[in-house]
Image (tube, grey):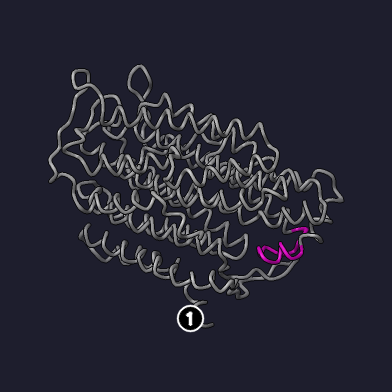
Amino acid sequence: MNLIEYTPWVCWISPLIGALLTFFSRSNTVKGVINSSSVFISWSSGLFMFSLISNKQVLNTKRDWFSLPVGSPVGLGMLIDPLSIIMANNVSFVSFLILVYSIWYMREEYGQARYWPLMSLFTSSMLLLVLADNLILFFIAWKMVGVCSYALIGHYYRDEERYWIGGPPPNSYLKPSTCTLKALLVTSFGDVAMLAGIIIIYLYSGTFSFTTLLDTSSDWMGKMSETPGLILGSTLLLLAGVVGKSAQFPLHIWLPEAMAGPAPVSALIHAATMVKAGVYIVARLFPIYYKAYWINGFQESGYFFQIIAFLGVVTAFITATEAVVALELKKVLAYSTMSQIGYMMLGLGVAGLSTSSIISGYTGSIFHLLNHVLFKAALFMSAGAIIHLTGSIYINEKSLDRRSTRYIWLFTWIATLSLIGIPPFSGFWSKDEILLACLESGQYLLFSLALLTVMVTALYSIRMMYHLFYTNVNNYDRVEVGHAKEDPVMIIPMGVLSTLSRNGGNWILV
């Protein structure tokens, strides 16, 4: 193998090594530095792979792993193409900044001996997920991400009252141990269904390889089409895993309660990694189903696009309306995450419903994913800082003095404007592409609901900012914090991400 073929292996193995090295240090700061450095190496490897995009190369570094009684041997390999390179760079870059932020955020928290290796293992698993060249390796990484998220969401497993979420009275409170168990059960339900779908596809195709599945789609899809409903059934099973992991309707109920974990965990799960895994696999399978539907003429394949488009726009609207009435700061952002992922699913769905909308829909969805990684990670970092400084998880209890927390105020506003989609911020351009794809594909009902959701997004975003920084001092406790409290280790990652959210996704897709 030449040098470029080693880089994807370095990319996902480096955080794994960092997680192991953590056990040899007793200093929490050193643990943070080790893990941050290992993820920085991953990002450097990802940047090195960008040369393949300019050269229009696709590499598949495959080695036989094991054989099954039927079909071709299962390979242990990395697939290096524009999609995996873009995803790997975003995961590693944002994870690096989140880990740097964690050094400040977790400095007085307990459980750091398990927190740091789990964060690195989580990042390693997500990188393996986006670089894997076959469905088996992908699914192993998919489950590793789920297990790590279970442990990280339940970081405060002792269930001290100060870490409860929910409320305020008369609403009930939820303990972290309950929240993390709910996340595990709901996502595992989808994972089992996805595994069943993968097995069905293998029985007809004889391969788990993404590239082979695409090349031979006419053969194995043809065999499946001989049994009416089989393509639709396998599609539903695959998408059940997607809906569960990416918190789309009707399996979206676990994500707001995943806020029981520390703020950096929320940033990692909601911005850079876990919930984006579903969008990634839909984008990865997109060419297979598009070819089957539009070139080979298998009509049942079209349900793949109809389902994700419908569920995407429904999720976007429903969860946006829930954000309007949410009182917990991180829950507002959680509902927002589900809504924005709904846009990504909508874009991929309408891209496959018409030959005229494939470019705007597919690129708009991936563009929005990149933008969301940036502005939502910045918002969760801001949320962690605000909760630390005010001592409250609710937006309507205490307000920050924007004059004495000017950097938090500024960076939160920049990320919020990108979330709303105000031009010229990056969120505007990616949402515009998705809405354009709806029009190009003739899906006017989906367009109308998506456009309405844009307005609802503006409503809950402005409401959140009003409560955090602009409430009447006579009715709310205003917390004044000196500049010394705005630690550079906290401010710098927030500033980088919010600044990039201004137009950060553009330079990747240009």
Number of disc labels:
1
Q: In this view, does 155 lie to the left or right of 340?
A: left
Q: Is residue 266 above or below residue 284?
A: above
Q: Kindly identify which residue carries mark 1.
A: 3
Magenta stretch bounds = 203-216
Residue 282 seen in the current view? no
In what quadrant of the picture does the N terminus appear?
bottom right
Provide residue 98's location: percent of width, then percent of height: 33, 53
Q: Is residue 463 left or right of residue 78?
A: left
Q: Residue at x 58, y 68 (%)?
A: 79
Provide residue 131's location: percent of width, then percent of height: 53, 64
Q: Which residue is drawn at 39% across and 59% down?
A: 93
Residue 326 occupies quadrant: top left
Dominant secondary structure (helix, strand or loop) of the stretch shown in magenta:
helix
Task: Look at the image and say whether residue 148 sits in the magenta stretch.
Answer: no
Q: Nearer the viewer, residue 409 or 10?
A: 409
Q: Is residue 398 above or below residue 12?
A: above
Q: Is residue 389 above or below residue 354?
A: above
The outermost residue toward the front is 424
Q: In this view, does 308 lie to the left or right of 54?
A: right
